[in-house]
Amino acid sequence: MKLKSVLGAAGFALMPVAAHAGGFDLTGQPVDIIFQEGNYIEAQVGIISPDVRGTNAAGPAIGASTNFGNVANDTPFGTAGVKFDFTDRLSGAILYDTPFLRSTTYRDGIFTGTSADVQATTLTAVGRLKLGENFSVFGGPRLQRASIDLQGPERLQFLPAPSTVPFYQVDVRDTGYGFVAGAAAEIPKYKIRAAVTYNSAIDHNFDSIETFTTPAGTLPLSASVDVETPQSVNIDLQAPITKSTLVKAKIRWVDWGGVEFRPPLFQAVTGRPVVEYTEDTISYRLTVAQRLNESFVGFVTGSYEEDGGEEISLFKTVDGYFGLGGGIIYESNDGLTVQLAGEYLWLDGTAGAQIPGAPLPNSSFDDASGFAASFKVGYRF
Protein backbone atom coordinates (compact mmCIF):
# COMPACT_ATOMS: atom_id res chain seq x y z
CA MET A 1 0.00 0.00 0.00
CA LYS A 2 1.24 3.47 -0.81
CA LEU A 3 0.67 6.28 1.65
CA LYS A 4 0.22 8.54 -1.35
CA SER A 5 -3.11 6.88 -2.02
CA VAL A 6 -4.40 7.93 1.40
CA LEU A 7 -3.08 11.47 0.95
CA GLY A 8 -4.59 11.60 -2.51
CA ALA A 9 -8.00 11.79 -0.83
CA ALA A 10 -6.99 15.14 0.69
CA GLY A 11 -10.58 16.33 0.94
CA PHE A 12 -11.80 13.62 3.29
CA ALA A 13 -12.03 16.07 6.20
CA LEU A 14 -14.20 18.46 4.23
CA MET A 15 -17.41 18.03 6.22
CA PRO A 16 -19.50 21.13 6.92
CA VAL A 17 -19.54 22.50 10.44
CA ALA A 18 -22.77 23.15 12.32
CA ALA A 19 -24.73 25.74 10.39
CA HIS A 20 -26.60 26.79 13.53
CA ALA A 21 -23.59 27.31 15.79
CA GLY A 22 -20.60 29.61 15.44
CA GLY A 23 -22.64 32.42 13.91
CA PHE A 24 -23.77 31.05 10.54
CA ASP A 25 -20.52 29.29 9.59
CA LEU A 26 -20.90 26.35 7.21
CA THR A 27 -17.98 25.02 5.14
CA GLY A 28 -15.06 26.44 7.14
CA GLN A 29 -13.56 28.12 4.02
CA PRO A 30 -11.05 25.35 3.16
CA VAL A 31 -8.39 25.70 0.43
CA ASP A 32 -7.16 22.08 0.65
CA ILE A 33 -7.49 21.66 -3.10
CA ILE A 34 -4.36 23.77 -3.68
CA PHE A 35 -2.29 20.94 -2.15
CA GLN A 36 -3.62 18.23 -4.47
CA GLU A 37 -1.00 16.59 -6.70
CA GLY A 38 -1.26 17.36 -10.41
CA ASN A 39 -4.30 18.78 -12.18
CA TYR A 40 -7.48 18.06 -10.27
CA ILE A 41 -11.21 18.90 -10.28
CA GLU A 42 -13.91 18.20 -7.69
CA ALA A 43 -17.55 18.93 -6.85
CA GLN A 44 -19.55 18.29 -3.69
CA VAL A 45 -23.23 18.43 -2.76
CA GLY A 46 -24.75 17.91 0.64
CA ILE A 47 -27.40 18.83 3.15
CA ILE A 48 -27.53 19.80 6.81
CA SER A 49 -30.72 18.84 8.63
CA PRO A 50 -30.91 20.56 12.06
CA ASP A 51 -33.58 19.97 14.69
CA VAL A 52 -33.81 23.02 16.98
CA ARG A 53 -37.01 23.06 19.06
CA GLY A 54 -38.05 25.72 21.57
CA THR A 55 -40.88 26.80 23.85
CA ASN A 56 -42.37 29.97 25.26
CA ALA A 57 -45.13 29.84 27.89
CA ALA A 58 -46.86 32.97 26.51
CA GLY A 59 -48.26 31.11 23.52
CA PRO A 60 -51.66 30.00 24.94
CA ALA A 61 -52.38 33.56 26.17
CA ILE A 62 -52.70 34.72 22.54
CA GLY A 63 -54.17 31.52 21.16
CA ALA A 64 -50.84 30.07 20.01
CA SER A 65 -48.93 26.94 20.94
CA THR A 66 -46.35 26.88 23.71
CA ASN A 67 -44.01 25.02 21.37
CA PHE A 68 -42.24 26.60 18.40
CA GLY A 69 -41.56 23.24 16.77
CA ASN A 70 -38.37 22.88 14.74
CA VAL A 71 -37.27 26.41 13.77
CA ALA A 72 -34.22 25.30 11.73
CA ASN A 73 -34.74 24.47 8.07
CA ASP A 74 -32.93 21.78 6.08
CA THR A 75 -30.04 23.47 4.29
CA PRO A 76 -28.61 22.11 1.02
CA PHE A 77 -25.14 23.27 -0.01
CA GLY A 78 -22.56 22.78 -2.75
CA THR A 79 -18.85 23.34 -3.35
CA ALA A 80 -16.63 22.98 -6.42
CA GLY A 81 -13.04 23.59 -7.40
CA VAL A 82 -10.43 23.05 -10.07
CA LYS A 83 -6.63 23.12 -9.61
CA PHE A 84 -3.82 23.32 -12.21
CA ASP A 85 -0.05 23.00 -12.05
CA PHE A 86 1.50 25.72 -14.24
CA THR A 87 5.13 24.86 -13.45
CA ASP A 88 6.98 22.69 -10.92
CA ARG A 89 6.78 25.59 -8.43
CA LEU A 90 3.60 27.47 -9.39
CA SER A 91 0.01 26.21 -9.23
CA GLY A 92 -3.45 27.78 -9.01
CA ALA A 93 -7.04 26.94 -8.19
CA ILE A 94 -10.53 28.40 -8.48
CA LEU A 95 -13.02 27.52 -5.72
CA TYR A 96 -16.75 28.02 -5.28
CA ASP A 97 -18.45 27.53 -1.92
CA THR A 98 -21.15 28.76 0.46
CA PRO A 99 -19.17 29.58 3.62
CA PHE A 100 -22.05 31.26 5.49
CA LEU A 101 -25.60 29.94 5.43
CA ARG A 102 -28.62 29.99 7.73
CA SER A 103 -32.34 29.30 7.26
CA THR A 104 -34.81 29.75 10.14
CA THR A 105 -38.62 29.64 10.23
CA TYR A 106 -41.04 29.83 13.18
CA ARG A 107 -44.05 27.74 12.13
CA ASP A 108 -45.87 27.80 15.47
CA GLY A 109 -45.98 29.70 18.74
CA ILE A 110 -45.93 33.44 19.46
CA PHE A 111 -43.49 34.22 16.61
CA THR A 112 -45.38 32.32 13.90
CA GLY A 113 -44.45 33.57 10.43
CA THR A 114 -41.01 34.86 11.40
CA SER A 115 -38.28 33.63 9.05
CA ALA A 116 -34.77 34.48 7.97
CA ASP A 117 -32.62 33.24 5.11
CA VAL A 118 -28.97 34.33 5.15
CA GLN A 119 -26.51 33.21 2.49
CA ALA A 120 -23.04 34.15 1.29
CA THR A 121 -21.56 32.46 -1.79
CA THR A 122 -17.93 33.01 -2.76
CA LEU A 123 -15.68 32.59 -5.76
CA THR A 124 -11.98 32.45 -4.82
CA ALA A 125 -8.86 32.37 -6.98
CA VAL A 126 -5.79 30.96 -5.18
CA GLY A 127 -2.21 30.79 -6.41
CA ARG A 128 0.52 28.76 -4.69
CA LEU A 129 4.28 29.33 -5.00
CA LYS A 130 6.73 26.74 -3.69
CA LEU A 131 9.75 28.47 -2.13
CA GLY A 132 11.66 25.21 -1.89
CA GLU A 133 11.06 21.62 -0.95
CA ASN A 134 9.64 22.46 2.48
CA PHE A 135 7.86 25.83 2.25
CA SER A 136 5.18 27.49 0.13
CA VAL A 137 2.96 30.56 0.19
CA PHE A 138 -0.49 30.96 -1.33
CA GLY A 139 -3.24 33.54 -1.69
CA GLY A 140 -5.57 35.40 -3.98
CA PRO A 141 -8.75 37.48 -4.35
CA ARG A 142 -12.23 36.50 -3.25
CA LEU A 143 -15.62 37.68 -4.56
CA GLN A 144 -18.62 37.23 -2.29
CA ARG A 145 -22.34 37.61 -2.97
CA ALA A 146 -24.43 37.99 0.21
CA SER A 147 -28.20 38.06 0.71
CA ILE A 148 -30.52 38.46 3.71
CA ASP A 149 -34.27 37.84 3.50
CA LEU A 150 -36.19 38.47 6.73
CA GLN A 151 -39.92 38.61 7.43
CA GLY A 152 -42.48 38.39 10.21
CA PRO A 153 -43.85 37.80 12.65
CA GLU A 154 -47.43 37.62 11.43
CA ARG A 155 -48.68 38.86 14.78
CA LEU A 156 -47.22 40.69 17.74
CA GLN A 157 -50.20 40.70 20.08
CA PHE A 158 -47.88 40.82 23.10
CA LEU A 159 -46.85 44.41 22.28
CA PRO A 160 -48.62 47.18 24.24
CA ALA A 161 -50.14 48.63 21.03
CA PRO A 162 -51.45 47.81 18.59
CA SER A 163 -52.92 44.51 19.70
CA THR A 164 -53.56 43.29 16.15
CA VAL A 165 -51.16 41.97 13.49
CA PRO A 166 -48.12 43.95 12.29
CA PHE A 167 -45.83 42.51 9.63
CA TYR A 168 -42.14 43.24 8.93
CA GLN A 169 -40.04 42.45 5.85
CA VAL A 170 -36.59 43.25 4.43
CA ASP A 171 -34.78 41.61 1.51
CA VAL A 172 -31.26 42.80 0.58
CA ARG A 173 -28.34 41.71 -1.64
CA ASP A 174 -24.81 42.94 -2.19
CA THR A 175 -21.44 41.92 -3.66
CA GLY A 176 -18.20 42.44 -1.76
CA TYR A 177 -14.52 41.66 -2.20
CA GLY A 178 -11.81 40.22 0.05
CA PHE A 179 -8.79 37.96 -0.09
CA VAL A 180 -7.20 34.78 1.23
CA ALA A 181 -3.52 34.40 2.18
CA GLY A 182 -1.48 31.65 3.80
CA ALA A 183 1.70 29.65 4.14
CA ALA A 184 2.57 25.99 4.53
CA ALA A 185 5.53 24.00 5.85
CA GLU A 186 5.97 20.42 4.65
CA ILE A 187 8.24 17.42 4.97
CA PRO A 188 7.41 15.62 1.70
CA LYS A 189 9.43 12.52 2.59
CA TYR A 190 7.18 11.84 5.57
CA LYS A 191 3.99 13.40 4.14
CA ILE A 192 3.76 15.93 6.98
CA ARG A 193 2.18 19.36 6.44
CA ALA A 194 1.18 22.36 8.52
CA ALA A 195 -0.72 25.22 6.87
CA VAL A 196 -2.08 28.53 8.15
CA THR A 197 -4.76 30.36 6.13
CA TYR A 198 -6.11 33.86 6.73
CA ASN A 199 -9.52 34.76 5.29
CA SER A 200 -10.19 38.50 5.24
CA ALA A 201 -13.41 40.13 6.42
CA ILE A 202 -15.69 41.28 3.59
CA ASP A 203 -17.81 44.41 3.92
CA HIS A 204 -21.30 44.58 2.44
CA ASN A 205 -23.31 47.78 2.09
CA PHE A 206 -26.97 46.90 1.60
CA ASP A 207 -29.46 49.41 0.17
CA SER A 208 -32.53 48.22 2.04
CA ILE A 209 -36.24 48.94 1.93
CA GLU A 210 -37.95 47.82 5.13
CA THR A 211 -41.73 47.57 5.44
CA PHE A 212 -43.80 47.41 8.61
CA THR A 213 -47.53 46.80 8.10
CA THR A 214 -50.33 47.45 10.64
CA PRO A 215 -54.09 47.92 10.23
CA ALA A 216 -53.32 51.64 9.89
CA GLY A 217 -51.20 51.06 6.78
CA THR A 218 -47.71 50.21 5.61
CA LEU A 219 -44.63 52.14 6.63
CA PRO A 220 -41.70 51.77 4.19
CA LEU A 221 -38.22 52.98 5.08
CA SER A 222 -35.22 53.16 2.75
CA ALA A 223 -31.81 52.96 4.37
CA SER A 224 -28.23 51.83 3.93
CA VAL A 225 -27.15 48.98 6.22
CA ASP A 226 -23.57 47.77 6.67
CA VAL A 227 -22.85 44.10 7.38
CA GLU A 228 -19.46 42.40 7.59
CA THR A 229 -18.78 38.70 7.07
CA PRO A 230 -16.00 37.99 9.58
CA GLN A 231 -12.28 37.45 9.17
CA SER A 232 -10.97 34.04 10.18
CA VAL A 233 -7.83 31.93 10.53
CA ASN A 234 -7.59 28.20 9.73
CA ILE A 235 -4.75 26.00 11.00
CA ASP A 236 -4.53 22.67 9.17
CA LEU A 237 -2.19 19.86 10.23
CA GLN A 238 -1.64 16.39 8.81
CA ALA A 239 0.77 13.54 9.55
CA PRO A 240 0.87 9.76 9.03
CA ILE A 241 0.99 7.46 12.02
CA THR A 242 1.50 4.27 9.95
CA LYS A 243 2.00 3.56 6.24
CA SER A 244 -1.75 3.24 5.78
CA THR A 245 -3.10 5.66 8.42
CA LEU A 246 -3.28 9.45 8.25
CA VAL A 247 -4.36 11.97 10.89
CA LYS A 248 -5.63 15.47 10.05
CA ALA A 249 -6.48 18.26 12.51
CA LYS A 250 -8.13 21.62 11.90
CA ILE A 251 -8.46 24.61 14.22
CA ARG A 252 -10.61 27.51 13.03
CA TRP A 253 -10.91 30.93 14.68
CA VAL A 254 -13.69 33.26 13.46
CA ASP A 255 -13.96 36.91 14.47
CA TRP A 256 -17.72 36.93 15.10
CA GLY A 257 -17.52 39.57 17.85
CA GLY A 258 -19.12 42.77 16.53
CA VAL A 259 -20.84 41.19 13.50
CA GLU A 260 -24.43 42.45 13.36
CA PHE A 261 -27.39 43.19 11.09
CA ARG A 262 -29.14 46.34 12.33
CA PRO A 263 -31.82 47.69 9.94
CA PRO A 264 -33.08 50.99 11.44
CA LEU A 265 -36.83 50.18 11.34
CA PHE A 266 -36.35 46.79 12.97
CA GLN A 267 -34.15 48.43 15.60
CA ALA A 268 -36.81 51.08 16.31
CA VAL A 269 -39.68 48.56 16.62
CA THR A 270 -37.94 45.82 18.62
CA GLY A 271 -35.21 47.76 20.40
CA ARG A 272 -32.43 45.49 19.11
CA PRO A 273 -30.70 44.43 15.87
CA VAL A 274 -31.92 41.42 13.91
CA VAL A 275 -28.80 39.59 15.06
CA GLU A 276 -25.68 40.65 16.94
CA TYR A 277 -22.68 38.53 17.86
CA THR A 278 -20.44 39.48 20.77
CA GLU A 279 -18.05 36.51 21.04
CA ASP A 280 -15.46 35.03 18.69
CA THR A 281 -15.54 31.28 18.10
CA ILE A 282 -12.86 28.59 17.95
CA SER A 283 -13.81 25.22 16.47
CA TYR A 284 -11.76 22.01 16.36
CA ARG A 285 -11.86 18.98 14.07
CA LEU A 286 -9.83 15.75 14.20
CA THR A 287 -10.01 13.14 11.43
CA VAL A 288 -8.32 9.75 11.12
CA ALA A 289 -8.21 7.96 7.74
CA GLN A 290 -7.36 4.29 7.29
CA ARG A 291 -6.64 2.53 4.00
CA LEU A 292 -8.85 -0.57 3.85
CA ASN A 293 -7.60 -2.03 0.55
CA GLU A 294 -6.33 -0.86 -2.84
CA SER A 295 -9.62 0.87 -3.67
CA PHE A 296 -11.17 2.04 -0.41
CA VAL A 297 -10.25 4.43 2.41
CA GLY A 298 -12.41 4.82 5.53
CA PHE A 299 -12.32 7.73 7.94
CA VAL A 300 -13.82 8.90 11.23
CA THR A 301 -14.08 12.53 12.30
CA GLY A 302 -14.99 14.50 15.42
CA SER A 303 -15.67 18.23 15.81
CA TYR A 304 -16.17 20.58 18.75
CA GLU A 305 -16.99 24.23 19.43
CA GLU A 306 -17.34 25.59 22.95
CA ASP A 307 -20.45 27.42 24.12
CA GLY A 308 -19.37 31.04 23.78
CA GLY A 309 -22.01 32.57 26.07
CA GLU A 310 -23.94 34.34 23.31
CA GLU A 311 -27.31 35.85 24.23
CA ILE A 312 -30.43 34.38 22.64
CA SER A 313 -32.34 36.20 19.89
CA LEU A 314 -34.98 35.30 17.32
CA PHE A 315 -32.31 33.90 15.00
CA LYS A 316 -29.61 32.87 17.48
CA THR A 317 -30.97 29.90 19.41
CA VAL A 318 -27.94 27.59 19.79
CA ASP A 319 -24.35 28.24 20.84
CA GLY A 320 -21.67 25.56 20.53
CA TYR A 321 -21.75 21.93 19.39
CA PHE A 322 -20.10 18.51 19.37
CA GLY A 323 -20.09 16.24 16.33
CA LEU A 324 -19.11 12.68 15.38
CA GLY A 325 -19.08 11.24 11.90
CA GLY A 326 -17.23 9.36 9.22
CA GLY A 327 -17.27 8.19 5.66
CA ILE A 328 -15.83 6.07 2.89
CA ILE A 329 -13.77 6.98 -0.18
CA TYR A 330 -13.47 4.95 -3.37
CA GLU A 331 -10.38 5.50 -5.55
CA SER A 332 -10.12 4.12 -9.08
CA ASN A 333 -6.89 3.50 -10.97
CA ASP A 334 -7.66 6.22 -13.52
CA GLY A 335 -7.81 9.18 -11.08
CA LEU A 336 -11.47 9.12 -10.03
CA THR A 337 -12.44 9.45 -6.34
CA VAL A 338 -15.94 9.21 -4.87
CA GLN A 339 -16.68 10.11 -1.26
CA LEU A 340 -19.73 9.58 0.97
CA ALA A 341 -19.68 11.20 4.43
CA GLY A 342 -22.00 11.96 7.32
CA GLU A 343 -21.84 13.57 10.75
CA TYR A 344 -24.26 13.76 13.69
CA LEU A 345 -24.27 17.04 15.64
CA TRP A 346 -25.25 17.71 19.25
CA LEU A 347 -26.08 21.45 19.41
CA ASP A 348 -26.14 23.47 22.64
CA GLY A 349 -29.51 25.24 22.96
CA THR A 350 -29.88 28.64 24.63
CA ALA A 351 -32.51 30.33 26.79
CA GLY A 352 -33.59 33.87 27.59
CA ALA A 353 -35.62 36.83 26.32
CA GLN A 354 -35.75 36.78 22.53
CA ILE A 355 -37.15 40.34 22.42
CA PRO A 356 -35.76 42.27 25.42
CA GLY A 357 -38.24 44.67 26.99
CA ALA A 358 -41.35 42.88 25.70
CA PRO A 359 -43.72 41.58 28.40
CA LEU A 360 -42.87 37.95 27.68
CA PRO A 361 -41.44 35.01 29.60
CA ASN A 362 -38.10 33.62 28.45
CA SER A 363 -37.85 31.21 25.55
CA SER A 364 -35.92 27.98 25.92
CA PHE A 365 -34.26 25.76 23.29
CA ASP A 366 -33.16 22.34 24.55
CA ASP A 367 -31.81 19.10 23.08
CA ALA A 368 -30.98 20.58 19.69
CA SER A 369 -29.29 18.31 17.15
CA GLY A 370 -28.51 17.97 13.49
CA PHE A 371 -27.23 15.66 10.78
CA ALA A 372 -24.96 16.54 7.87
CA ALA A 373 -24.38 14.38 4.79
CA SER A 374 -22.31 14.98 1.68
CA PHE A 375 -21.37 13.35 -1.63
CA LYS A 376 -18.19 14.38 -3.43
CA VAL A 377 -16.59 13.41 -6.74
CA GLY A 378 -13.00 14.25 -7.67
CA TYR A 379 -10.89 13.54 -10.75
CA ARG A 380 -7.15 13.84 -11.32
CA PHE A 381 -6.23 14.58 -14.94
Image (spheres, rainbow, N blue to C red):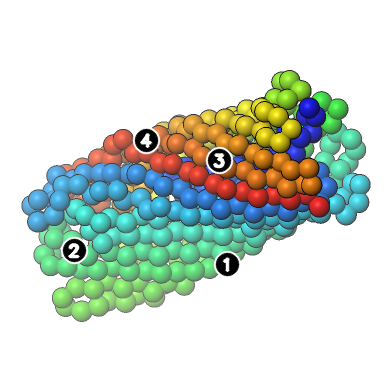
Label of residue 212 in the image: none
Circle 3 packing at 10 Å, graded few (<14), some (14-19), many (20+), is many
Q: Where is residue 200? Give x, y as percent.
A: 63, 51
> Is residue 65 depicted above or below 250 in this figure?
below
Query: What residue is shown with label 4?
Result: 348
Secondary structure type for disc 2? loop
Query: Circles 4 and 3: CB distance less than 8 Å?
Result: no
Circle 4 packing at 10 Å, graded few (<14), some (14-19), many (20+), is many
**Marks 1/2: CA distance?**
33 Å
Q: Where is residue 29? Give x, y as percent.
A: 61, 48
Label of residue 155 in the image: 2
Q: Nearer the viewer, residue 115 or 278?
A: 115
N-terminal-most mark, 4 or 1: 1
Query: What residue is shown with label 1?
Result: 175
Q: Hey, which quadrant is residue 4 in on the image?
A: top right
Query: Circles 1 and 3: CB distance less than 8 Å?
Result: no
N-terminal-most mark, 1 or 2: 2
Amino acid type of the residue tagged 1 in the rendering = Thr
